[in-house]
Image: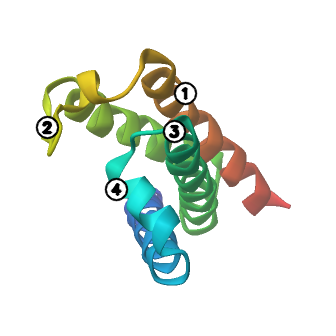
Amino acid sequence: MRLVLGIVAGLVAWFVAITAIGFVLRLLAPDVGAALVAHTTVVAMAERLAISFIGSLFGGWMAATIGKGQRAAMITGVIMLIIFVPYHLFGSDQHGPIWTSFPLWYHLTFFVSLPLLAILGGRFARR
């Protein structure tokens, strides 16, 4: 039961972290917030990835802390990957399908970072 709670907490922590960071950026730096929404430049894409990286680390840490181990962090990262691959391939945003809105390097970086950084975040919980 603790493993499941850790995984759920990790997923929620990821979404809370990226939402909170995005909100604060739009509030404190409107130009950055507008660029994040438009995602038209390499800098904006790098900023979006950085926000996701922080969320993944936090989600992995939360999962491992509550789930009492690295397994919860790993599963959290894999579930995020399972959620986001179909969304990127078939989902859409205001600019059309997400897969065509971003370059390949962005998708690959995002996909690889989800489980790896969640695992790394989980390692911080063990210390």
Which residue does the numbered mark 1 point to in the structure image? 109
Looking at marks 4 and 3 on the same chain, the residue that comes earlier in the sequence is marked by 4
Query: At 63% from the left edge and 42% from the top edge, which residue is drawn?
Result: 117
What label sits on residue 92 in the rendered view? Answer: 2
Image coords of residue 33 (percent x, y): 44, 66
Nearest the eye: 35 or 58:
35
Q: Give the amino acid type for the residue marked by disc 4 in the picture.
A: Val
What label sits on residue 125 in the rendered view? Answer: none
Looking at marks 3 and 1 on the same chain, the residue that comes earlier in the sequence is marked by 1
Which residue does the numbered mark 3 point to in the structure image? 114
Circle 4 — which element? helix
Alpha carbon distance from label 4 to label 3? 20 Å
Q: Quadrant of the C terminus?
A: bottom right
The outermost residue toward the top is 104
Looking at marks 4 and 2 on the same chain, the residue that comes earlier in the sequence is marked by 4
Circle 2 — which element? strand
Looking at marks 1 and 2 on the same chain, the residue that comes earlier in the sequence is marked by 2
Which marked residue is nearer to the observer: mark 3 or mark 1?
A: 1
Which residue does the numbered mark 4 point to in the structure image? 37
Alpha carbon distance from label 2 to label 3? 20 Å
Query: At 49% from the left edge and 67% from the top edge, which residue is drawn?
Result: 31
Query: At 38% from the left edge and 42% from the top edge, which residue is drawn?
Result: 80
